Image: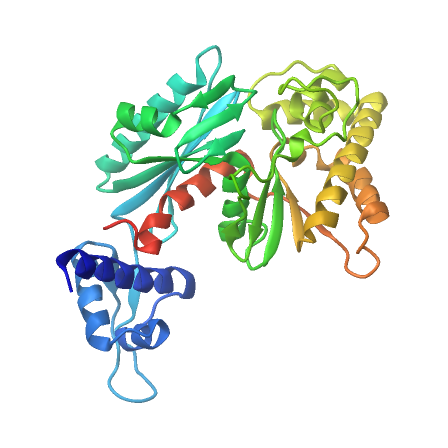
Amino acid sequence: MTLVATEDLRRQNTATVLRSLRHDGPATRTELARRTGLAKATVGTIVGALVDGGHVSESDAVAASRGRPGRPVVLTGAALVGLGLEVNVDYVSAVAVDLGGTVRLERTVPVDDQDPYDVVVAVARESAALMTGVGARVVGATVAVPGLVDRRNGVVAMAPNLGWRGRSVADDLGTATGLSVAVENDANCAALAEARRGATVGLGQSVYVTGTVGIGAGVISDGAIVRGTSGFAGEVGHIPLGDPAARCGCGRRGCWEASVGLRAVLAAVGVVEDGTPLEAAEAVSRRAATDERTAEVLDGIGMLLGKGVATMANILNPDAVVLGGYFVPLAPYLLPATVREVEAHVTSAPYAALDVRLSTLGLRAAAAGAAEEALTGVFSGATAL
């Protein structure tokens, strides 16, 4: 066996142990050998190296039903983090997650009148420096972008609301920050975050619908992102379900996004866009509480939202659809009409009702999922510790 093959096998075996600890919890070396199918000696060598690297620790010995007491191995993971960055029209968010799943950093910075790319470069540098300052190494960064992403080449093919077309974000940001950078669609990242730590933990099939300036969907099947042949799956914001006269940021008319996206909502109720999408939506919610017309407009938008959700449900038949972003603070005014449309148009509703849920992760859902995605190489064995 060559040296390269030996190193590849060592990484794969280490990743197997790490995945077991992350997904199934602490275990003694003997239990890890049983769970992973690896030899006890191999597990012992891997655990020793992980302890030396600060990635795991061993607790006090506990009595076993048979044999000698064992010391449970616990995935601390504090020495290594994945950095997730979300770039949107109005803000840039950053979340750092360590190997053990602990969130080590969360921050959101307004874009204001700056170029969003300049903001994400600054946030990435500052976040990496903060992690280094507490003794954690950033193993990689994933940037979540609202648009079509050529993930294999690290290129944003089209992000209309950002004005990006054919932009080599992975290479450019990697050069600017010195980090290993990947790019992913924002809805995909948010869907992954909900499946790992949010509203859809434990579900097999789920769909996450973003609720910001743009509307997109992330699809999760058995814990993995469904990307489609070219990686462009989930661009539901551009299905022709909206007002036929409404012009979308993509240049077409009638897109769903042009009628249920945040800017369309703000224009419909006469509220000036200010702050983050959640802050703008909260302003609309306060108005709707005392203004009947605003509440009626939101009910109509809820109907259009429901038509889109029903369309996705009929195609994908998920366990649940999660509404995120601005949909959450406006849920009291949107959800009744949305649920009525879903019940009326989802074919399977009489036999298996569609579960429509609200995001539990707030504005940083996409950044949190991007941070999880940045750790994928470690848990797959593609990235060395």
Please tell me which residue lies in front, 83 or 145: 145
Closer to the camera in the image, 304 or 198: 304
Q: Quadrant of residue 26?
A: bottom left
Position of 188 with respect to 138 (left or right) is right
Quarter of the figure with residue 368: top left
Note whether residue 146 is visible. no
Task: Say which residue appears at 78% left-offset and 38% top-offset.
Answer: 307
Display colour scheme: rainbow
Instruction: Name the residue located 82 percent from the left edge and 29 percent from the top edge.
Output: 300
Residue 32: x %, y % from top left = 31, 72
Q: Quadrant of residue 296?
A: top right
Quick one: which residue is furthest to the left in this view? 3
Q: Residue at x 28, y 73 (%)?
A: 38
Q: Is residue 121 left or right of residue 215?
A: left
Q: Is residue 184 visible?
A: yes
Residue 148: x and y in percent read 53, 31
Q: Position of residue 304 (x, y in %)?
A: 78, 33
Q: Nearer the viewer, residue 125 or 179?
A: 179
Compared with 94, 316 (above or below) is below
In the image, residue 291 sits, relative to residue 50, either above or below, namely: above
- In the picture provided, is 3 more to the left or to the right than 323? left
Q: Which residue shows up at 42% across the image and 29% down it?
A: 155
- Residue 169 in percent (x, y) is at 39, 26
